[in-house]
Image: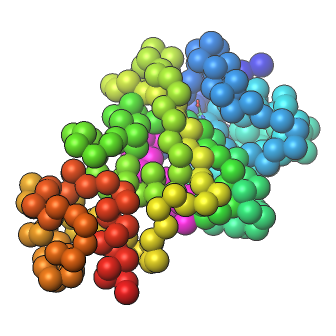
Amino acid sequence: MKPELADIKLKNGLPHQARKRFGQNFLHDNNIIEKIIDSIAPTKNDHLIEIGPGQGALTIPLAESGARIDCIELDRDLAAFLTKEFANRSSVNIIQQDMLKYDLSELSNKEKSLRVIGNLPYNISTPVIFHLLKNHHLIADMVFMLQLEVIQRLTASPGDKNYGRLGLMVQYFCEVEHLFNVPSSAFTPKPNVVSAIVRLKPYAELPFKAKDPECLQTVIRTAFNQRRKTLKNSLRGIISENILETLPIDTSLRPENLSLAEYVLISDAITK
Ligand code: SAM
């Protein structure tokens, strides 16, 4: 059964208080939990990585599938609680670590062998996604709870007000699907924002492959550092106007109007 907040006792015998600095908003709504588990559809052959298992709201039903689950939890008290809770389940392994410092390749080196899931701590969700993308080749898919606003950035198209570096870099590596929204009443304590579930599926073959993805990152970062300027002006420091003018791109556009394919063209022109 899902543990209640008050069930988790610290060493001093007091109940666990949600820690704001760790972005702790625990899911308690069983319908939402079920919907998330259905979206993941775990099987016993899966190798799941759960980021921030907290009090096990998702871990406990996921473990029913018999899948191998490696959980990365930063909070020592929660990690100790879960280690006890799952002591009799050898398929569930609790790792007390900071996800931002944890290297996924310690768990598997096989292409597309890992399924990553998590109700992510909102304060570090973007850096966690960038960190995971370093190992995109190891990941079959990811299902995350995020702030709706972040998912709007992940799914944004050219011209949208949310279009920018995060969406472009994630769309470079992954197919992105906004699954459903989650009201703040599903959590304890309630966050001040609406949340949603997203699926990110790394492509087997990248649809727009840059010669050098690092260079692509630099181009996109530089362009959006000055998003109100025209492309010609915002990229002045990294590509000459002469080279830019040879590309089939309207350089009087603003960075927010260019597609991923066009950013790849610019990056490849620099990499040549
Ligand atoms: N999965 C639980 C749930 O849905 O109720 C808890 C989700 S809570 C939003 C985020 C969890 O991530 C917390 O348990 C928090 O301690 C953990 N966490 C925060 N920062 C972390 C980090 N850098 N690495 C790993 N876990 C982290």
**Residue under the point 88% across and 38% down:** 44
| Left or right of 150 in this view: 182 | right
Segment colored magenta: 121-134
Q: Is residue 54 above or below residue 73?
A: above
User: Majority secondary structure of the magenta segment?
Assistant: helix
Across and down, in percent, residue 114 comes to: 72, 53
| Left or right of 179 in this view: 50 | right
Q: Is residue 14 above or below residue 123?
A: above
Quadrant in which the N terminus appears: top right
**Residue under the point 69% across and 61% down:** 138
Quadrant in which the C terminus appears: bottom left
> Residue 244, located in which quarter of the rendered image?
bottom left
The residue at the far bottom in this view is: 272
Q: Is residue 64 above or below residue 208?
A: above
| Left or right of 11 in this view: 121 | left
Across and down, in percent, residue 242 comes to: 15, 83
Across and down, in percent, residue 164 comes to: 29, 51
**Residue under the point 25% across and 72% down:** 247
- Could you tell me if residue 192 is visible in this image? yes
Q: Is residue 165 magenta?
A: no
Q: Is residue 213 above or below residue 87?
A: below
